[in-house]
Image (cartoon, rainbow, N blue to C red):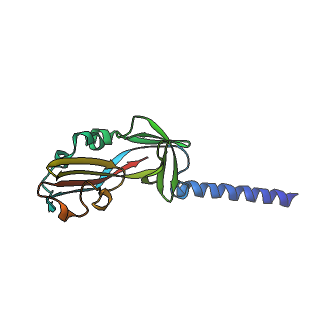
Amino acid sequence: MKNFIYLLAGLLLLATSCKNDDDEQGPSNRNPNAGDSFLTYDVIENRSFRMWVGGEEVPTGDLDFGDYLHEDANEYFAPDIIENGNVQFVGDTVIVNLGFVPPNSKFRYRFSNDSLFIIYPWIGESFTAVGTKQSLKMAQGYFYASRTLNESWLWRWQFETFNMNFENIEDELYWDKFSEMSPLDTLVIYNQDLRYKN
């Protein structure tokens, strides 16, 4: 009986020691996607602003990207909206306040391989960001295109939660390659990454 008490005391001491080690090692050894969390704006990174006119790339170093935003796209890039944005995880629901969706929008979600997928009721599952419930990086991509075609002037713009490039904005009304652009045709591509942290 005495040996049993010593064995029990030893196991209790070992269990307490392991728990203290876990506490000292911090959250890095725990599941970063466990529990609820509230993430707020941290920083904008990896900004890229490119423009082509008549098939030739135009230097944009001295240009203000905001001057080339279509007015309907302003809310996607307005600093006050972005900086006041937040993402909250509560149970199996993510609550999004990022300006480009209605306030307090609630969706189901899942993480897979450090990627956040939001499950939208109207389109299903969609990749949204990279990271965990502790820190997320969300890409923003925008393009604006205007074209003269048969004496008509066409334009369109698009915002996405992924980075844009010439290949992923192809459209039968526009160009398959830059050499097809006429002298007044214009293409603007802007990308940036938003970071949110707990």
| Nearer to me, 113 or 55 | 55
- Residue 155 lies left or right of residue 76; in this view the side is left
| Total marks placed | 0
Residue 112 horizontal/vertical position (percent): 52, 57
| Nearer to me, 166 or 26 | 166
Quarter of the image for residue 3 reads bottom right
Residue occupying the far front of the picture: 150
Residue 157 horizontal/vertical position (percent): 26, 47
- Residue 3 lies left or right of residue 25; in this view the side is right
| Nearer to me, 125 or 54 | 54
Residue 74 horizontal/vertical position (percent): 25, 41
Q: Quadrant of the N terminus?
A: bottom right
Is residue 169 at all visible to an observer of this figure?
Answer: yes
Image point 64% across, 57% down: which residue?
A: 17
Image point 57% across, 53% down: which residue?
A: 23
Q: Is residue 69 above or below residue 164?
A: above
Is residue 78 at all visible to an observer of this figure?
Answer: no
Residue occupying the far top of the picture: 103
Residue 9 horizontal/vertical position (percent): 76, 56
- Residue 59 lies left or right of residue 163; in this view the side is left
